[in-house]
Amino acid sequence: MTDLFDLTGKVAVVTGGGRGIGEMIARGLLDAGARVYVTSRRVEAVDGMIAMTADLSHEEECVRVAAELTEREPGGVHVLVNNAGATWGAPMAEFPESGWDKVLDLNLKAPFFLTRAFQPLLEAAATDDDPARVINIGSIDGLRVPAFENYSYSASKAGVHQLTRVLAAQLGPRRITVNAIAPGPFPTKMLAAVLDVEGEAIAASSPLGRIGRAEDMAGAAVYLSSRAGAWVTGVVLPVDGGIATTR
């Protein structure tokens, strides 16, 4: 069973991996034995990981990062985590076009263009028994009507979930699985202000009575990245303590 979840010798790339959900995933993959690259618009020191600067809202940056990884990792990339994202909240009457463009470019377009750019790297690392993996980070706000007026964010995450299914069908014959994680509330910078005000109520909305912990997110990512998840594809996995599925 230990070997099933072992990522020793694997190469993983986590976009937006310097903080929040991305950092939780990156640290989990690192602890499981993977060599982990993290991308961010601003490179920050990340213990044990290799940081790369990138603004993935532009297709040319996706292509550049893939080219750089091709030079650094000629054996390919085993795991690509499309985590980098943005949010925007405003009343419907005031919601700006820029709030759609910024969020859709990073949350929905970037996973498509980065996965396409990485496809040769993923195919190079894949085997019949242990496919390469793409993990897209969605949200429970893409599974339900959100409590906040984050129109472009919730729409983009619902799009990520459907894109995951489409890519799973397209890339499965290439020995690449594609799954999504739909996080619920976790202690991240994006959610910090909300948790400060409504943390107890949000925790109480879960049948398990708490918000997520770093190991909850790491465990889901390691499962989908390891041989334990080798026959799982096209799945949107809520990691939310049951909030989206029981309320």
Image: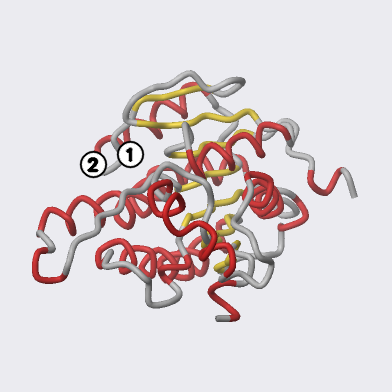
Which color scheme is applied? secondary structure
In the picture shown, does residue 67 fall above or below 85?
above
Q: Secondary structure at mark 2?
A: loop
Q: Which residue is mark 1?
A: 62
What residue type is disc 1 on? Cys
Asked whether 148 or 76 is in front, the reply is 148
Residue at the spot x=59%, y=68% of the render? 204
Report x, y in % for residue 8.
75, 32
Q: Residue at x 58, y 20 (%)?
A: 47
Res 242 visible: yes
Q: Where is residue 33 shown, x and y percent of the image?
A: 73, 32
Compared with 241, 133 (above or below) is above
SS at badge 1:
helix
Q: Which mark is residue 58?
A: 2
* Residue 177 vs residue 51, the one in the foreground: 51
The amino acid beneath tag 2 is His
Q: Establish if 35 lies above or below 169.
A: above
Residue 107: x and y, percent?
Answer: 33, 54
Q: Residue 4: x and y, percent?
A: 83, 49
Q: Quadrant of the C terminus?
A: bottom right
Task: Residue 9: name its quadrant.
Answer: top right
Identified at 37% across, 71% down, the residue is: 147
How many numbered markers are drawn? 2
Displayed quadrant of residue 84: top left
